[in-house]
Amino acid sequence: MNCSRGATRVNILQSVQGLESGTAIFNMTLILHKRNRTASQLLAAILFLLGFAYAQPVSKAITTQIDGRNAILLGTDWYPEQWPEARWEEDLRLMEAAHIKVVRIAEFAWSRMEPSENHFDFEWLERAINLAAKHGIVSVLGTPTAAPPAWLTFKYPDTLRIDEHGRRATHGIRAHGSATSPRYRESCRRIADQMVLRFGHNRNVAGWQIDNEYGYARMSFDDVTKNSFQSWLKAKYKSLDSLNEHWTTSYWSQTYDDWREIPIPGEEAEFHNPGLRLEWNRFVTDTWADYQQNQIDVIRQHADPRQFITGNFMGFFDGFDHYFISRPLTFASWDDYVGTGHLDPVGNGLTHDLVRGFKRENFWVIETQPGAVNWAGVNNFLNKGEVRVMAWQAIGHGADEVGYWQWRSALNGQEQYHGTLVGPDGTPVPLYEEVKTIGSEFAKAESALRGTTPVSEVALLNSYDSRWAIEFQRHSTKYDPVALLKTYYRFLSPLSQSIDVISPDAPLQDYKLVVAPSLNVIPDNLAQHLSEYVRNGGHLVLGPRSGMKDEFNALLPQRQPGFMADALGGRVEQYYALEKDFPVSGAWGEGQVTIWAEQLKTLVPDAEVLLQYGPSNGWLDGQPAALTHKFGKGRITYIGVVLDERLMATAAKWMVDMSGVKPVFGRVPDGVEVCRRVGGGKEVFIVINHTQERQPVRLPRPMTLVLEDGEVSAVDIPAYGVSVLADNNAK
């Protein structure tokens, strides 16, 4: 149960004006974020969740590994509807030769599957699925709801999204359907229902993907959405007095006397009330969760339980709370693209760990970059070997499938220049051979990786509420909460060689060290959860701006870190956005702090000052910049600054040493990444050379080469090279 945001479902019967038929009834199931529930409310919610809410099928130990298939899979996105059927056999022959084992199909084929209203054609799709199976390839069906057919949007314009300026989307783009339109939802449900009735028990269909990238979480700024948001607020707050109090609407004469007065933050959103803006983002989350559930329900009703359901996310995209959206999915997937430039191993590794943390399970990379994209500023091609490195990094961080978008570019359409594995003439492009090598290696390594997953002693906390709250009011344009999270990851990762990125309300008891940069929103119940972790022996590190807000995005009446101040034995006296760097010194040495600085104060004698400011703005001179305090069996540390690289490196080393965290493999050269997967009595290390130079790596003990043969005590990894090693002494 979410400590700061529980989930319950409420049916709201709402009259909606403006549909083609005049007045219609919009009966929408909404998932409400509630706080400070009474015991009876909490019990009711638990009973409801046990009986009805977003139930998931009984899970296998590792749901991302498909029964009867290789444990790790190579895939691609195939669009048979774009090509003559006579071409399919050759495409599938080339896929089989490249060891491709899975294709995602149909996610943009709505107009082919339902060429006119209520007339369906799945014969071609069944032939494509069966032909793929002859080549040892299993299919994943995407529901096609990211791109509705022209007959639908022309006949029913209310299915099209309206933007913040009141302009209705036009047909021919994508993500142009309205997630709140009752008619569009019914159309989405109908096509999903017809697909699952046809393919829900097809043994060659492994699973389903809902939509495609969730319409980038765009909302329709129309009366349907506005009325729905107002009803959502009414169901949550119960009374306008409660809403007005929590939003402090006496400020700027915002007080509401009628639910219909409450706006949606479209144009000039930056000037709206922080409470309204946070609730709007939660409403967007609930809307897309319900949009997703609308399709999941019919799939679950008719599909074989072995068929999984996933959705393809976009890494650190913050259009909704991914932890909440992921709950009903069998597992999470994401689309891994570099864009301009080259692979950033730190940022990409962090994002893999983020996605793994959505459900705290292995995941799929259902789309990834085949050399180049078409949508970046400069669509350069990745270096030879870099695509292979990306694939193995994904596996090392817990992916069990890597799929390339796309197999072959359509001859016309908006993404003609995007990278592919086969050219427009139908013959392989140069990258095909590198992908073929990846497929061959996956086949060799799959048995060693079966039943394995990354395991970590260190966790980073990622909170969408806190990220949104800071993004609404950065106070410094340079303060980027994701960049700060990445900084902590960059310095902690080499020291632990495995990190989980999880929600603050996730179970914490298995971690020795939990780090929460920028945890801005810490309501009382979350503070209790974090305090209990420390009390039982964990080490919690809070970064700047932590514990400033409550669950309504209101300032807490306590100084930072709010409800955590007693455990810290200290507090924040004042915060400062910095126009220049200031000096600090202490237990972590000397250096500079940048962007943000907080003046701390100890409240108990045994709170230890780790850093102090040097001469700066007068207010900060000689004041504490970082504190630590033993609490219960554990320790809580507060770092009120953004540290320079040298100090960050020292602080990270102090954190892991103080917490008893040790690297799982041992020291490796700079530019070499170590990933570990364990399970079933196996321990497998994936050692990746991200540099363009050969790197020697000494092993902590003799291990067996998985991709080659023999036992070794050291490996010499070439540029963009990978070594997969099985530990013979795993317990």
Image (cartoon, helix red, strand yellow):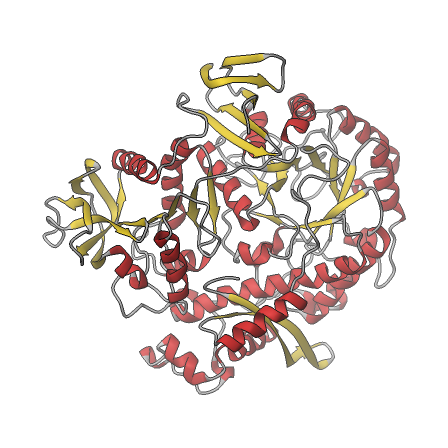
Q: Position of residue 693 (x, y in %)?
A: 45, 16
Q: Is residue 123 above or below residue 38?
A: above
Residue at image x 44%, y 67%?
A: 277
Quadrant showing the C terminus: top right
Q: Toward which corner of the image does residue 160 lie, by quadrant?
A: bottom right
Q: Position of residue 629 (x, y in %)?
A: 25, 50
Q: How many marks?
A: 0
Whether residue 145 is visible, yes or no, is yes
Q: Position of residue 359 (x, y in %)?
A: 57, 50
Q: Toward which corner of the image does residue 563 lie, by quadrant?
A: bottom left
Residue at image x 25%, y 64%?
A: 559
Name the side, left or right, on which 208 lies relative to 572. right
Q: Nearer the viewer, residue 372 or 612?
A: 612
Name the side, left or right, on which 134 lies relative to 710. right
Q: Is residue 101 above or below residue 209?
A: above
Residue at image x 64%, y 56%?
A: 175
Q: Nearer the viewer, residue 22 or 369?
A: 369
Whether residue 179 is visible, yes or no, is no
Please identify the residue farthest to the bottom as the structure is shown.
Answer: 257
Q: Nearer the viewer, residue 75 or 384?
A: 75
Residue at image x 40%, y 64%?
A: 270
Q: Nearer the viewer, residue 624 or 710?
A: 710
Q: Position of residue 464 (x, y in %)?
A: 46, 56
